[in-house]
Amino acid sequence: MAEVLLTLHCAAADAEAIGEALRLALQTPVHVRSEAVLGLDFSDATTAERVTARLDRRAIELVLSEPNLPTALAALDRVRRSGAVRWYTSPILERGRIA
């Protein structure tokens, strides 16, 4: 079964709720990190972000089996959010843990 890395980009205010919903729906670790995006597309931006041309976003990442992608997107769709979420998947070719 193929695994993918699901990456989502969302408003900072939405990250905790999205991360928790994905963790509960998929029973998998969810990684959240801060990102400053020097934007060109301001359709999802707040007024302050438009003035500074700098979007305050969070990247949320999790590894899941490809068949679980619809479950992840359905969980995301149910979360109450202040803005849009952009997402993409990348194939996982290998992974491991070094202690």
Image (cartoon, grey):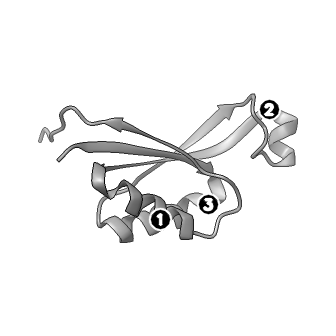
* Callout 1 amino acid: Ala
Give the residue drawn at x 70%, y 56%.
Answer: 83
Give the residue drawn at x 75%, y 28%.
Answer: 40
Tell which circle, 1 or 3, labels the residue nearer the N-terminal end.
Answer: 3
What SS does tag 1 mark? helix
Q: Is residue 44 left or right of residue 70?
A: right
Q: In front: 14, or 75?
A: 75
- Quarter containing the C terminus: top left
* Callout 2 amino acid: Ala
Q: What is the total number of numbered labels drawn onto the structure image? A: 3
What SS does tag 3 mark? helix
Q: Nearer the viewer, mark 1 or mark 3?
A: 1
Tell which circle, 3 or 2, labels the residue nearer the N-terminal end.
Answer: 3
Q: Which quarter of the picture shows residue 79?
A: bottom right
Tell which circle, 1 or 2, labels the residue nearer the N-terminal end.
Answer: 2
Q: Mark 2 points at which residue?
A: 53
Task: Please give the label number shown on residue 44.
Answer: none
Viewer can see residue 65: no
What SS does tag 2 mark? loop
* Callout 3 amino acid: Asp
Task: Please give the label number shown on residue 74.
Answer: 1
Q: Marks 3/2: CA distance?
A: 20 Å
Where residue 92 sits: x, y (%)? 26, 36
- Does 18 appear above or below 49? below
Give the residue drawn at x 78%, y 42%.
Answer: 43
Q: In front: 96, or 69?
A: 69
